[in-house]
Image: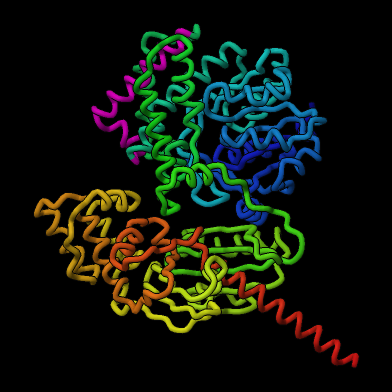
Amino acid sequence: MDNKKTKVGIIGLGPIGMTLAVHLQEAGCEVLICDNDRIKTNQIRNEGIRLENIMQKSARFSSIYSSSAELFQQNPHYVFICLKTYQVEGLLKEIPDANTSVFISAQNGIDVENMLSDKFGEKRTMRMVINFAGNLSAPNVVKATFFNPPNYIASLDDSTKNLAEEITALLNKVGLTTKTINSFELTKCAWEKTILNAALSPLCGIGRFTMAEAMEFPDTIELVEQIIAEAIEVAEAEKIRFPDDFIRNCLRYLKKGGNHFPSLAGDLMNHRQTEIDYMNGKIVEYGRKYYIRTPLNLSMVNMVKAMTQKNIISQMGSSNGQAAKKLLNVKPLRLHPKGSCFLGIDLGSAYTKFTVIDEEKNVIFRHLLKTLNPDKVASKHVIAAIHEEFPIKYSCATGYGRKYFPDADIIKTEINCAAFGANEALKGEKNIIDIGGEDIKMIRCGKEGNVENFYLNDKCAAGTGAFLTEIAERAGIDVKEMSRLASQSEFNQELNSFCTVFAKTEIMKWIFDGIPIENVSKGIYLSIGNRIAKMHIDLKVPVVMIGGVIAHHPYIKTFLEKKLGQNVLVLNDSQHVVSYGAALQARESYLLEKKNENHKTLTTKL
């Protein structure tokens, strides 16, 4: 096949997908790339993909798609699947049955290729074992951290070895060294790679270690060695044989990993679903098949799953397990709305929030971005992608940085936007408590939901998100663990100082005095909660809480309910309530403007 005419599709633009895309385009292929992250695809469309660190390459692409259906209309010869394993089931439902592509699974884990072969058959399915890795330093930039060549590729039934050799030739041509092997060798390579991942990835995620840090301590090395030993026993029951020095070679390999967070560890630390079921989970599954006990691998599976559930519960500010399960299975927001759309932008001191709603006030898109982002044009990319995807008729900017969005149609204060957003969830009179990155607001709304009065904390950033983060850091407390720790404490002493500098000193004295970490956590929350309780809260009307802090610190709600003697409602998606209110303001302004235009037209005709 003429390389220049070879169409290669890449579905999934993580580090693996983007690395393959750049190299295959360099090899002369026509590369079609696809990812449902509109922010990412928009940035790639404008700037291309860049590989940095041990790989120094870049490429621009003209065929960029946000849905697999669009990609398959181009009839690619090969399609690399570079998605997480838990995303493949949804993809398979979108791929047209009439397609004639050959599929290559470029994923981690055991048996991942079976999802493709079950639908398309073994003759049209290949598996690639990837031996390079990287992290995203920007949506379109891969920091390649290591490559231990070669990669391996094979046909599942060895009937299309010539096609595997064609892919190998293309990648070797541009330095991404790859070797064609047979299906039996492929199984062994997949197990070997999975054993390496299973030995270290969950440990790095649970302990927040880079590979280098995890392989630095004798205790963790011993744990890694025992996880590998369990996996070898299971593999041998599957007739997969490794050399006598395999464990030693694995440890040597893992020690070369460097300051790199494996993919699964990154997902766990960033509160995303993981691929643990296809790594340690498969080792446990095959162990049960042969009645082989795998307690360490099972421990890793159960701990990762428990932490994933806890992370999601913590994000929701709730201990409701059913709510967490619902969030795990949440469907993507609708991407192709009918009618007009409205954009709300809330630029806070810590995070910038984007919300898009349709004519019926339904939320169809949300996005969160650090305000002080290393990618200084990140907000522009998000807004450009939103305008490209949705028919935005009107936009409203709010928050500290609202004046930095000159293209917004209107600008409103966060006080009014908070009231607008909260009123959709709870009509009538209410107190709204908004704990932000740099201030605390108490907003009193009347019967119509309008702002009647509001109060701000009067001592710098005392009790805010910034205060919490800095104090927790000084105390050596993981912010994600603070609420759980505080709930276990009977401590009743609060911080005397609200100045961050003096509070840090007081915290250090507590630690030197031997006060347990759960008591320190409780003391921090007591200080914040007591301060909020003094902010002119009308106890005759409901109290609702919004903002990013309450989303991650549910114990504040628990304390305030005891302090105030009444229920406190934390609104869903509390961090986006203000940007949602801004979107509602944009919608109302647009409808009012349209009404005035119609009235003016009617008056002119009369």
For residue 231, side relative to residue 401 (left or right) = left
On screen, residue 158 above or below 216: above
Residue 193 x %, y %: 48, 23
Quarter holding the C terminus is bottom right
- Between 370 and 283, the residue placed more toward the observer is 283
For residue 252, side relative to residue 33 (left or right) = left
Residue 484 x %, y %: 30, 49
Q: Does the magenta-highlighted stretch encompass residue 402?
A: no
Outermost residue, right side: 605
By secondary structure, the bulk of the magenta-drawn segment is best described as: helix
Outermost residue, left side: 513
Q: Residue at x 21, y 68 (%)?
A: 501
- Between 594 and 35, the residue placed more toward the observer is 594
Q: Residue at x 54, y 28 (%)?
A: 130
Residue 366 x %, y %: 58, 58
Residue 302 x %, y %: 40, 30
The stretch in magenta equals 208-237
Q: Does the magenta-highlighted stretch encompass residue 221?
A: yes
Q: Residue at x 73, y 48 (%)?
A: 62
Q: How many marks?
A: 0
For residue 364, side relative to residue 465 (left or right) = right
For residue 9, say whether it is visible. yes
Q: Quadrant of residue 33?
A: top right
